Each structure stands twice: as structure tokens, then as C-alpha cells.
Image: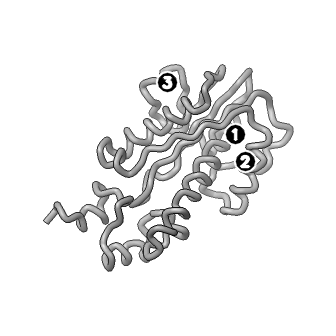
Amino acid sequence: MTCRLNGFVGGIDEAGRGPLAGPVVSACVIWSEPPCSKHGVNDSKILTDRSRRTILEWIRENTFRIGIGIADHNEIDGLNIHKASLLSMERAFEDCSMTPDLLLIDGKFRPDHLPFARTVIKGDRKCFFIASASIVAKVVRDTMMCHLHELYPAYHFDKNKGYPTEDHKKAISRFGITPVHRRTYKGVREYCENNG
């Protein structure tokens, strides 16, 4: 993983673009000095849930600041997932209440209010700072989906995290949609009452 540290460096990444339910969550993680060890930090998608949670504790102990930004299912439906993701990134940055010397964002787009940020395509695989943010965002979102599972146990959000697994799609077909489903998504909009 590349990306050299020079002063305060922040990484931003999101989790939850593809699910049929729940929010999209971004994290902004700001580092003040190079960590002595990368401690297994990598793209959150290739780590196990246990590894992510262990690494998250290490990140919390070693980073300078962490910010979380959330765009809920209503905002996703109202804006579209691309704009909602950028909004959640902006909120994560604002939650940190500081501007680092360098801000790196995963992907090729950045929020309009963060013109100084640099984008890095596949940054969660290439850059430690973005990868650390990807882990925080993923664990926070997964935890939120586990809480939603307690409200809607028939959909098994604790296991599928809102993604369109076969069990999730079968639950929608059998029980309909919940208030936290994304009504503009294929696989959900077919079951909305207003669609006739």
C-alpha cells in the first residue's frame, strides 16, 4: 500500500452502495504520524468481520481523529446513491472538525465542498489511509444493520447487511418491504404500493 504521510493525512471511504436496504456510511480517518505497523489494514472487502473489528480497535487507539457520515435510505432514494454517497463523505469530513494537510478519497469523484481533496481510484486497495477509512465505514454500517435486524428479523439484516442475497430477496417477496428499504432500487421498487 502506497501514499506517503506528510503532516496530517485523512482518508475517506464509504460502505453500502449496493444494498437494497439501510444507509450508506462514510468514514474519514485522519492520521497525525506514520503508524509503526500497518496492523493488517487493507481493503475492508477482503477482510473477515472478526479481522475488521480487531483492526478497528487498533485504528481507534492510533489515529488522530475519526469522523462518520451517514446518508439514510430516504436520502438515497431522493438524491440517488452516487449523490448520497458523496453527501455521506462530506458529512464524515465535517464530523472530524479539522482539515488535514492531505485528504484522499476513494474513487474518481469527490464532494463539491471538498475541492482540495485528491481522489484515488481503487484507493481502498492502494492506500493505507483510505483502507483504514473503509474498515471503519464497513464496521459502523454492519453494526447499524445488525440493529435493524432486531426491528425486522425476517430479513436477516444481521447476515446479509441489506445486500440482495437470495434469502433477502425471498423475504421481500414473502413479506414485502420495510420502511428502511431503498424504494428506487431494482428488487425493491417492484414491491412498492405506488408502483401498481
Label 3 or label 2, whichever comes before in sequence order: 2
Question: Residue at image x 58%, y 47%?
Answer: 137
Left/right of residue 56 with respect to residue 95 in the rendered view: right
Between discs 3 and 1, the one toward the N terminus = 3
| SS class, disc 3 | loop
Checking the image for residue 128, the label placed there is 1
Q: CA distance from mark 3 to mark 2?
A: 25 Å
* Extreme residue in the front direction: 151
Q: Residue at x 16, y 62 (%)?
A: 195
Res 61 label: none
Q: Which residue is mark 3?
A: 114
Return the residue nearer the eye: 14 or 146: 146
Q: Is residue 195 above or below residue 141?
A: below
Quarter in which the N terminus is drawn: top right
Q: Amino acid at mark 2?
A: Val
Q: Amino acid at mark 1?
A: Phe
Q: Are marks 1 and 2 in contact (CB under 8 Å)?
A: yes
**Label 1 Cα crowd, 10 Å radius (few <14 / some 14-19 / many 20+):** many
Q: Residue at x 55, y 26 (%)?
A: 118
Please tell me which of labels 1 and 2 falls first in the chain: 2
User: What residue did someone put label 2 on?
Assistant: 41
Would you say the residues marked 3 and 1 are in contact, meaning their CB atoms lie under 8 Å apart?
A: no
